[in-house]
Image (cartoon, rainbow, N blue to C red):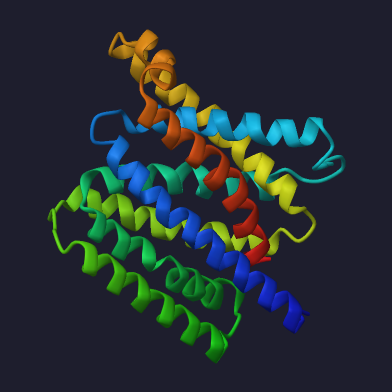
């Protein structure tokens, strides 16, 4: 049973997580205007994997999957990062910042609905009020900055996929009670590294620009800053915060 302290910690983690992810949308929108989505994701998860690996090597984190089923972790990784980040990143690249912000601001609502329908958990009034306040705040911030619209159907579809994927991811994380946050996060990073690296390298090979892909962080300062922020802040720190908040 969750104590008041656990609820407060979870809420603070969720708030910090949303703040980090909110800033990442800016980096994503700027970078994907002239660089491949798959290149961004491939490099992002390589940086994240290296960062997490260093924490494990120096003993700051420990994981032990011995005797544990990998199926729950596979389902978590399938919905996030794989499906979610493909939907989010492509969705942001096809739409305006205000549109993508509106869609992604609906994730807490979608997660609450999924929890109610699939886990049979009745939402508390404070949860509903908190989500509505957050949603209103996000919408006000977004439309205060920009009200431009793209009317990109494919962009909306990708963003909808991202919202649904994240809601299902949150369900599987909540059910994965036998795994630590480090174990879940590391599995997610490995899955993201494998899938997005293969996709990025395949795309670069087809377009005959493998060398360009490999040299990107060394010749493009803005790209380097983006993958460092998204790889460390978003894919390591925010993943931890998200898993703690959901749990």
The residue nearer to you, when weighing 86 against 142, is 142
Q: Is residue 21 above or below residue 16?
A: above
**Quadrant where the image shows the N terminus:** bottom right
Vertical placement of residue 36 versus 5, above or below: above
Q: Quadrant of the C terminus?
A: bottom right
- Say left or right for 14 vs 146: right
Name the residue rendered at 27%, 65% in the picture. Answer: 142
Residue farthest right in this picture:
67
Q: Is residue 199 above or below residue 52?
A: above
Residue 51 lies, with reference to residue 26, above or below; the image says above
Give the percent coordinates (x, y) of residue 68.
82, 46
Count of all numbered marks drawn on residues in the image: 0
Seen as rendered, the residue at the extreme front is 221
Q: 101 and 124: which one is in front?
A: 101
Q: Residue at x 68, y 40 (%)?
A: 186
Picture coordinates of residue 45, whole percent (x, y): 53, 33
User: Which residue is drawn at the image coordinates 17% and 52% (left, top)?
Assistant: 153
Going by the image, does 217 lie left or right of 146? right
Provide residue 164's location: percent of width, then percent of height: 42, 60
Q: Quadrant of residue 54?
A: top right
Image quarter of residue 57: top right
- Image coordinates of residue 122 in percent, x first then y, are 58, 85
Query: Relative to residue 239, is residue 56 drawn left or right?
Result: right
Q: Residue at x 12, y 56 (%)?
A: 151
Q: Would residue 41 be found to the left or right of residue 70 on screen?
A: left
């Amino acid at each position: 049973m969750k104590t008041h302290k656990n609820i407060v910690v979870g809420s603070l983690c969720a708030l910090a997580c949303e703040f980090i992810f909110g800033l990442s949308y800016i980096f994503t929108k700027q970078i994907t205007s002239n660089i491949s989505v798959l290149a961004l994701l491939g490099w992002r998860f390589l940086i994240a994997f290296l960062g997490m690996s260093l924490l494990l090597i120096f003993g700051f984190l420990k994981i032990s999957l011995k005797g544990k089923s990998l199926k729950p972790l596979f389902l978590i990784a399938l919905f996030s990062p794989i499906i979610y980040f493909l939907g989010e990143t492509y969705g942001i690249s096809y739409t305006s910042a205000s549109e993508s912000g509106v869609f992604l601001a609906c994730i807490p609502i979608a997660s609450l609905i999924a929890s109610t329908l699939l886990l049979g958990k009745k939402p508390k009034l404070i949860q509903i009020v908190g989500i509505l306040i957050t949603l209103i705040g996000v919408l006000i911030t977004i439309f205060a900055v920009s009200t431009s619209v793209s009317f990109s159907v494919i962009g909306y579809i990708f963003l909808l996929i991202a919202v649904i994927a994240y809601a299902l991811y949150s369900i599987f994380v909540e059910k994965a009670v036998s795994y630590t946050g480090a174990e879940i996060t590391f599995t997610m990073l490995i899955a993201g590294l494998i899938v997005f690296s293969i996709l990025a390298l395949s795309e670069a090979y087809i377009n005959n620009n493998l060398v360009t892909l490999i040299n990107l962080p060394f010749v493009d300062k803005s790209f380097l800053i983006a993958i460092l922020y998204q790889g460390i802040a978003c894919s390591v720190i925010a993943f931890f915060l998200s898993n703690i908040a959901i749990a």
